[in-house]
Amino acid sequence: MGVSPEEVFIIHRSGPDNIMDSFKTDFERIEQVLNRHFSSHEPFINKVSQYILFSEGKRLRPLLTVCSARLCGKTDEEVYNLSVIPEYLHAASLLHDDVVDGGKMRRGRPPAYEIWGNKAAVLVGDFLFARAIDLASRFGIISIAKTIAETVALMSEGEIIQLLQMRAQCFDEETYLEIIDRKTASLISTSCRIGALLAGARESKVEALGKYGLYLGQAFQIIDDILDYTAEASELGKALGTDLAEGKLTLPLVVAIKKASSKERERLLQILREGNPSHEEFIWVSNMLISTGGTEYARCRAKALISSACESLDIFPESKTKDSLKELAYFVLDRHK
Amino acid sequence: MGVSPEEVFIIHRSGPDNIMDSFKTDFERIEQVLNRHFSSHEPFINKVSQYILFSEGKRLRPLLTVCSARLCGKTDEEVYNLSVIPEYLHAASLLHDDVVDGGKMRRGRPPAYEIWGNKAAVLVGDFLFARAIDLASRFGIISIAKTIAETVALMSEGEIIQLLQMRAQCFDEETYLEIIDRKTASLISTSCRIGALLAGARESKVEALGKYGLYLGQAFQIIDDILDYTAEASELGKALGTDLAEGKLTLPLVVAIKKASSKERERLLQILREGNPSHEEFIWVSNMLISTGGTEYARCRAKALISSACESLDIFPESKTKDSLKELAYFVLDRHK
């Protein structure tokens, strides 16, 4: 049983801002733990880490851990302690991705590597990975440490497949889904799974929350892809068209390449190959994504995924927390940044 | 009770080659596991990993895990499965270090990043880190996962302190020891500790083997420092004088800077600051290390550390494995590459 149109309407009425406001206390407690737990003997590591950790991140991953644990009946301080682990992993991967992709803006600010150099970004990223797993092992639940290690492996595999895809100029939907599953959705899924594991939930509940997170993560990335061509740069917090400039595979683009005329396809591929498109080229590509139905197709896929995410929660009895997780899913769909 | 001069003499008589030959069966089994365990769905990851994993490494770390477990009474296949974990971590850190330091040669071959790019090196390094911790979590012993995570944090801290030291041109022995403890000795110590942990050894034995590995690791790095100025490039498998070119703090250099006349010190620091020394400058620095007693001092420190490493094993009853670990320590001291 999924979410009916009526339900969607009710959920939507509360509006994206309201749902995030309702998690205010959770966010405050997450922030406290992020501040408390993170410390190296080396002030420089703290400086770089704090730059990336406290840069107006949405804290979606820790919130999912907290809500998942709550849905499985666990609400104590341990939940907040655990919830910062996916945020550390996320920060670590941002540090490494920035080095890797040469991205120019991250959450409205220059990336860490431009300030402190590639060396520092790679090493502080390593430190954050290690601290996340160290923290995970402190809970004494081996399945948590294991799921996190597997996720880090998947994330790096995803980035590598993306790297090879960019080099090979391979643009099919299957490759695209393989990439986003690993590099984005796996960590969002794990954020949910570890909450359930900490709560000692039975396997079916862990799997249900894992699926919720996986679908949510896929939708999250698809929306990100759309925003890269449509958002206001100031809202997105990074330069618009970054994906295009890097020749990155995104879902609207996959469709556009497939649906375009052979002449248009050739121009699209040439722009992707050459990188650094002019403003004119960017506008032309953006329009292609709309005229070929690429953006629309991507948005429909994201919507369907959000429905699937909500359906995954069917095995749980109705509760305020279950409603919150559904609202959160629709917030991800409707976000503008 | 340490190793007496007579003992050292007896150990030395067997010669460095003989001791490594005596581990032939262990090395073969380690190699089998390295080949078996390592696989990603992505062939490219396997290619880059294999390049770094099968590049004539000494396999010192896996051997220490195997011998440590054996000293604590465990000898089955599980030991070999565990032993590859520190080798994966070592390979991962080499991949990241090569990106980081811009080193030109690694084990006689160009570094991975020069062949496949910085991106691939960082990401495959991440993948190897993750696989090592994933593998560790499969043993179901949380203390093993924890000690490995702590070690990765220490290693990245060590690299970062080294990075800051190079930037700040800070050359004191205390900083030097802090760096090598973290970036080299911690993993060698952990290689020993995890063997003991897998064997279910009591805390005092885990600590004793951890100390043995720590002293051995410190000595290993000091010998490495000396070899960078004295070995034949073909033997060392990397360009001679790499440390000098990178302005890296090494123990002979610490002493030379302290003991040199103010004029000589100024020239030394200038060469370090400017990087890329000429052949003449390299020879001049090498001679300074000898005339100031820097090399001699470093060698004495390494010898003393090897003695301490052997003393750490005093709590274990006499056995063939204990002798082997002592011989291995002297092999590290006498190595030429």
Image (tube, coloured by chain):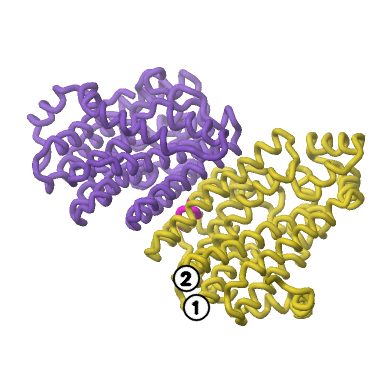
Chain colours: A yellow, B purple
Q: What residue type is labelled 2?
A: Ala
Q: Is residue A97 left or right of residue A281?
A: left
Residue A319: quadrant of the picture = bottom right
* 10 Å crowding of disc 1: few (<14), some (14-19), many (20+): few
Outermost residue to the front: A1
Q: Nearer the viewer, residue B137 or B304?
A: B137
**Residue A189 location in percent, x, y?**
58, 60
Q: Give the range drawn in magenta.
A: A127-131
What residue do we see at 87% from left, 43% from top? Answer: A259
Q: Which residue is drawn at 77% across and 43% down?
A: A245
| Image-based side of B9 in relation to A179, left or right | left
Q: In which quarter of the image is residue A19?
A: bottom right
Quickly name the residue at label 1: A73
Question: Between disc 2 and disc 1, whose residue precedes?
Answer: 1
Q: How many marks?
A: 2
- Residue B305 lies in the magenta stretch: no
Residue A60, percent from left and from top? 63, 66
- Give the camera-side residue of B87 and A279: B87
Q: In this view, does B254 lie above or below B202?
A: above
**Identity of the amino acid at label 1?**
Gly
Label 2: few (<14), some or many (≥20) within 10 Å? many
Q: What element carries label 2?
A: loop
Identify whether B108 is placed above or below B83: above
**Residue drawn at the location 66% of the way across and 60% of the way down:** A215
Q: Do the residues labelled 2 and 1 touch (CB within 8 Å)?
A: yes
Residue A201 is marked as 2
Relative depth, front residue between A70 and B153: A70
Do dots 2 and 1 share one subunit?
yes
Name the quarter where the N terminus of chain B is drawn: top left
**Magenta stretch: dominant SS?**
helix
Chain under disc 2: A
